[in-house]
Amino acid sequence: MLVLSRRPHEAIRIRHDIVVTVLEISGDKVRLGIEAPGDVQIHREEIYLAVRAANEEATARPGAAGDLARALGGGAPAPRGPAGPAPSTPAAPPAASPAPATPRPPADPRRG
């Protein structure tokens, strides 16, 4: 771990696109400002650890994928074997609808 000392309004640069600035020191609290690109995720450590633990718990529980799929309205996922999903068989062509026995007269434009 690299340990650095900084005073208020002094910064630390990480790579060329992340800047961490000490904004304020008040008692035992330090306020930091972080400038980073939008695709860089920034989380407080305790939040990151809680989300990671919840994700690990959810994926370790049997049936978790089916629960998620049902919650999203997609039903349970198709069962998979060791080699992946079974190849699908081609669907039968749709049955042709029978033609009407007698043709309909044209619609009356006065009726709405």
Image (tube, rainbow, N blue to C red):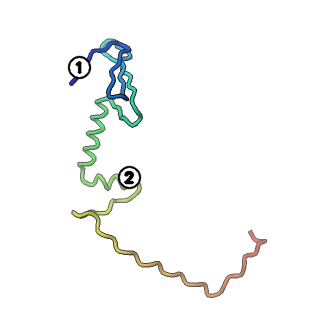
Q: Nearer the viewer, mark 2 or mark 1?
A: 1
| Badge number at residue 3 | 1
Task: Where is residue 88? Give x, y as percent.
Answer: 33, 71
The number of callouts visible is: 2
Residue at image position (35%, 15%) is 10
Task: Where is residue 21? Give x, y as percent.
Answer: 36, 20
Q: Residues within 10 Å of mark 2 (few under 14, many from 20)?
A: few
CA–CA distance in space, label 2 to label 1: 46 Å
Q: Quadrant of the N terminus?
A: top left
Amino acid type of the residue tagged 1 in the rendering: Val
Amino acid type of the residue tagged 2 in the rendering: Ala
In the image, taking residue 106 as reference, residue 31 lies left or right, namely left
Front one among 94 and 53? 94
Residue at image position (37%, 75%) is 90
The residue identified by callout 2 is 71
For the residue labelled by badge 1, is the local secondary structure a helix, a strand or a loop?
loop
Task: Where is residue 112? Give x, y as percent.
Answer: 74, 68
Task: Where is residue 94? Give x, y as percent.
Answer: 47, 78
In the image, taking residue 66 as reference, residue 73 lies left or right, namely right
Front one among 100 and 44? 44
For the residue labelled by badge 2, is the local secondary structure a helix, a strand or a loop?
helix
Q: Residue furthest right?
A: 110
Rendered position, 13 above or below 51: above
Determine which quarter of the picture holds residue 66: bottom left
Decide: marks 2, 1 in contact (CB < 8 A)? no
Residue at image position (72%, 76%) is 107
Closer to the N terminus: mark 2 or mark 1? Answer: 1
Residue at image position (28%, 63%) is 79
